[in-house]
Image: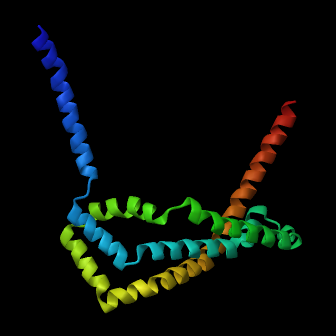
Amino acid sequence: MFRKTTKVVVLPLLFMSFLVIKVNAQEIIIPEKRALIKELLEVTEATKLTENVLNTMILQGESNYPQLLSGVQGNGKDIEQNKERILESRRRFSKRFRELYPQRLNLEQVIQQIYYPLYDKYFTEDELRDLVIFYKSPTGKKSIMVMPQLMQESMQKSNELLNPKLIQLIKEIAEEEKKRLEEEETGQEKKQ
């Protein structure tokens, strides 16, 4: 009786432990591949590139701050009247953000958590070797050098093209919502 009970309990436990081992094994990147990913991230200066992209996003956000506010508020006079306060608020926000984000955001850790599994998922060891070779080449080095500027200019161009359309869309939706709320309010007043 004891042996039967032991088999009934032990066999499912063994099966479950194999499943756990299999799931954990899928999350583990073999050392050779991890080394290639690390080399690729180093040669492409992934940390520096991530910092540059983040800084570019912050700068774009800062430059679009008043324009986006006017789109949400829908009244250019409000923006003009409060321009100095808005600019000062933006400066304080940006300064505080730049002060705190390095303390609260470990980019190396984030890069490892994001890029290692993704490169492992999408590239074989041979492909990673090819990428490392490419990024060590003159063309690869140039692409690394120009990428931050390319990203900044593409974001700037995107903002120039998209912001007016997005602001118009925001205004339209805000106006629709305003009308809907007014109609609801009017409808409730009539019921009373």
Instruction: Choose top left, top right, bottom left or bottom right for residue 31.
Output: bottom left
* Outermost bottom residue: 138
Quarter of the picture containing the N terminus is top left
* In the displayed structure image, the side of residue 93 where residue 30 appears, left or right: left
Q: Where is residue 144 in the image (x, y as percent from the top left)?
A: 40, 83
Q: Position of residue 83 (x, y in %)?
A: 84, 73
Which residue does the image show at 30% across and 69% down from the upper left? 37
Q: Position of residue 85 (x, y in %)?
A: 84, 69
* In the displayed structure image, the side of residue 125 where residue 27 appears, left or right: right
Between residues 6 and 56, which one lies in front from this camera angle? 6
* In the displayed structure image, the side of residue 110 where residue 30 appears, left or right: left
Q: Where is residue 164 in the image (x, y as percent from the top left)?
A: 66, 74
Question: As displayed, is residue 81 above or below residue 133?
Answer: above
Quarter of the picture containing the C terminus is top right
Which residue does the image show at 50% across and 80% down from the upper left? 151
Q: Which colour scheme is used?
A: rainbow
Between residues 186 and 50, which one lies in front from this camera angle? 50
* In the displayed structure image, the side of residue 101 where residue 138 appears, left or right: left
* Outermost front residue: 103
Which residue does the image show at 28% across and 83% down from the upper left? 134
Between residues 47 and 127, which one lies in front from this camera angle? 47
Question: As displayed, is residue 113 above or below residue 148?
Answer: above
* Outermost top residue: 1
Which residue does the image show at 10% across and 13% down from the upper left? 3
Instruction: Choose top left, top right, bottom left or bottom right for residue 155.
Output: bottom right
Question: As displayed, is residue 134 above or below residue 188?
Answer: below
Q: How many marks?
A: 0
